[in-house]
Image: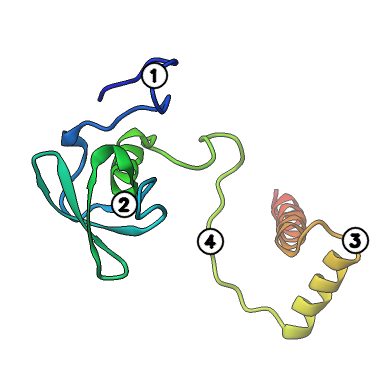
Amino acid sequence: MVRLNKGDELGEHIQDLNDFQLGDKIRIRFGPYTGARGIICSEVEGLLKIELDTDEIAQVTLEEITNYSRAARRAWKAMPKRAGRPKGQKPAKRMISMRLDADLWEMLQEATERGLIPSREKAVNDWVREQVVKILSKEE
């Protein structure tokens, strides 16, 4: 990849010809087709042949396009191995399926809307935990 210095024309980086692949989805940044989107069909002597969404064919230089597919490829390479919340922050939860009476579920929703409980999930977790701890402590 070639980078322009601060004072150079455009003030942005120019993509190298190796940065594109046939079939990449692009948007034309300037020129007669500004804003048009399309797919790279071929490259001949530094000019890209683009099939626009309007079924027209445009020939542009690499500097005239934003290559969305290239950006996506680079994002996938840079993506961390594990996304989401870091391990060990909260106790692990498991997705389960439970059947509750419909009126009970609606009552829990109403209690949530009134601000009496933070969420239906938290309320059920807290109340079930409280009862299971009582039952287990009676056995000892």
In the rendering, which numbered label is found on residue 116? 3
In the rendering, which numbered label is found on residue 95? 4
CB-based contact (under 8 Å), mark 2 and mark 1:
no
In the rendering, which numbered label is found on residue 65? none
Q: Residue at x 85, y 67 (%)?
A: 113
Is 1 displayed left or right of 118 in the figure? left
The location of residue 49, given as percent across then percent down, is: 17, 53
Q: CA distance from mark 1 to mark 3?
A: 61 Å
Residue, disc 2: 26
The kind of residue tagged 3 is: Leu
Disc 3 packing (10 Å; few <14; some 14–19; many ≥20): few
The kind of residue tagged 1 is: Asp
Q: CA distance from mark 2 to mark 1?
A: 24 Å
In the rendering, which numbered label is found on residue 8? 1
Q: Residue at x 73, y 63 (%)?
A: 124
Label 1: element kind = loop
The location of residue 126, given as percent across then percent down, is: 75, 55
Label 3: element kind = loop
Disc 4 packing (10 Å; few <14; some 14–19; many ≥20): few
The kind of residue tagged 4 is: Met
Nearest to the observer: residue 119 or residue 43: 43
Q: Residue at x 53, y 61 (%)?
A: 95
CB-based contact (under 8 Å), mark 1 and mark 3:
no
Label 2: element kind = strand
Q: Is residue 101 above or below residue 57?
A: below
Q: Counting residues from the N terminus, which is met first, the one under dot 4 or under dot 2?
A: 2
